[in-house]
Amino acid sequence: MDAKEELKAKFLEHKDSTRVKVRFNDTDAMGIVHFKNYMVYFDDGFVSFMNSIRNRRKIEEMIHEGLACGVRHVDITYEGSAKFGDYIIVETEIKKLRNKSITFSHMLHKKSDMELIVKVESVRFVMDLKTHKLLNILEFLDYDLK
C-alpha cells in the first residue's frame, strides 16, 4: 500500500462522537425537535470530527483564512425524535473519499437510551474562497499531519 492509500485508510477508519443538548428554540410547539434543526446537529458532528483529525489548525481557523466547507448533497432519514432537554450523541465518520468531495455518515442517537433518531449522509467539498477552486480532499486533510 502506498502512502496515499495508507493516508486514505487512516481517515476512513477515524470515528468521532460529540454530544449536543436540545435547546428550547430547537423545538416546535409540542417540544419536539423541528426537522430542520437536525441539520445543525450533524454540522456540529462535522466540526467535531474535523477538529479531532487536525493537529494545528481547527476548522474555525480555516474558515477565517478563506476556506469554505460546503455541502453538495444531504440524504437524511428520520427514525425517531428528540425533545427539549434531551442530549443527542452525534457519531461521525467518513464513508467515502474522492478527489474533490468527501462523504460523511452521521448517526444521531438519544443519549438516554441510544435510540437511533436520525441517519444522515452528507457530501461536502472544500473551496478556496479567494480562487473559487475546489481543493483536493486528501491534500486538505493531510495539511496539518505533515
Image (cartoon, rainbow, N blue to C red):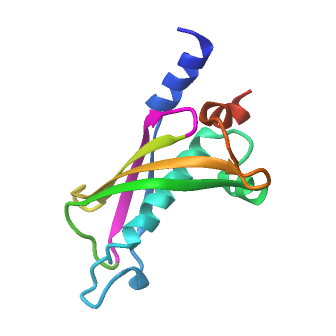
What residue lies at 57% left-to-right and 47% top-to-bottom?
125
Magenta segment: 85-100
Residue at 67% across / 49% down in the picture? Answer: 127
- Whether residue 51 sits left or right of residue 105 in the image: it is right
Which residue does the image show at 42% across and 79% down from the upper left?
A: 23
Left/right placement of residue 31 relative to residue 134 reads: left
Whether residue 10 is situated above or below residue 105 in the rendered picture: above
Residue 97, magenta (yes or no): yes
The front one of 76 and 16 is: 76
Residue drawn at x 35%, y 77% is: 85
The image quarter in which residue 93 lies: top left
Residue lying farthest to the top in this orientation? 1
The part of the image, by quadrant, that contains residue 103 is top left
Q: In this view, does 135 lie to the left or right of 40?
A: right
Image-quadrant location for residue 115: bottom left
Farthest residue toward the bottom? 29
Q: Where is residue 42 in the image (x, y as percent from the top left)?
A: 43, 59
Q: Position of residue 95 (x, y in %)?
A: 40, 37
In the depicted structure, whether residue 33 falls above or below residue 8: below
Magenta span contains residue 7: no
Secondary structure that dominates the magenta span: strand
Q: Quadrant of the C terminus?
A: top right
Q: Is residue 87 above or below residue 95?
A: below
List the single residue furthest toward the front.
Answer: 132
Place of residue 63 in the rendered image (x, y in percent of width and height, measured from the top left) = 71, 57
Q: Residue 32 in the image: state x and y as whole percent.
A: 27, 79
The mark total stands at 0
Query: Between 36 and 135, which is closer to the camera in this rendering?
Result: 135
